[in-house]
Amino acid sequence: MTNPVSIAEGTFTNRANATLYVPAGSKAAYKAADYWKDFKEIVELPESTGIREAELNKDADSWYTLQGVKLSAKPTERGIYIHNGRKVAVK
């Protein structure tokens, strides 16, 4: 995105003392645009790299809590756990 976003006048009341963070490649457009150019500083964010690839580690006998914490063995307390990629109720 290189064009400034449309915004209602008065949305930001303290522009003269505020820093505006804008997407990579759009700083010049914001510096030239009415309203946006009134910010004290305009900082261009680096381009996001995102997540390109994730590797799934499937341990055949791993147990996890619903919060993603790996357990050392099959749980003995009642509850719902993750085992082999599925939710399992331990009663």
Image (cartoon, rainbow, N blue to C red):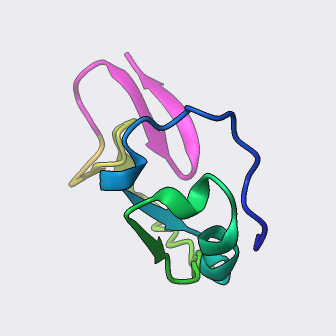
Residue 91 spot, x, y in % from top left: 37, 15
Task: From this view, report whether residue 68 is shown above or below residue 80.
Answer: below
Task: From this view, report whether residue 23 is shown above or below residue 79.
Answer: below
Residue 56 spot, x, y in % from top left: 56, 72
Tell me which corner region of the image, top left, top right, bottom left or bottom right, holds residue 49: bottom right
Residue 90 spot, x, y in % from top left: 39, 23
**Is 83 or 24 nearer to us in this picture?**
24
Q: Residue at x 76, y 74 (%)?
A: 2
The magenta span reads 75-91
Q: Quadrant of the N terminus?
A: bottom right
Q: Residue at x 59, y 57 (%)?
A: 36
Task: Tell me, yes or no, whether the highlighted magenta stretch contains residue 89.
Answer: yes
Residue 44 spot, x, y in % from top left: 51, 78
Q: Residue at x 46, y 41 (%)?
A: 82
**Is 41 or 45 nearer to us in this picture?**
41
Indicate left or right for 19 with 77 as reference: right
Indicate left or right for 25 with 42 as reference: right
Q: Residue at x 59, y 75 (%)?
A: 50
Residue 53 in sight? no
The total of numbered circles placed on residues is 0
Indicate left or right for 79 with 55 as reference: left
Tell me which corner region of the image, top left, top right, bottom left or bottom right, holds residue 59: bottom left
Tell me which corner region of the image, top left, top right, bottom left or bottom right, holds residue 72: bottom left
Task: Tell me, yes or no, whether the highlighted magenta stretch contains residue 78.
Answer: yes
Residue 77 in sight? yes
Task: From this view, report whether residue 78 is shown above or below residue 83.
Answer: above
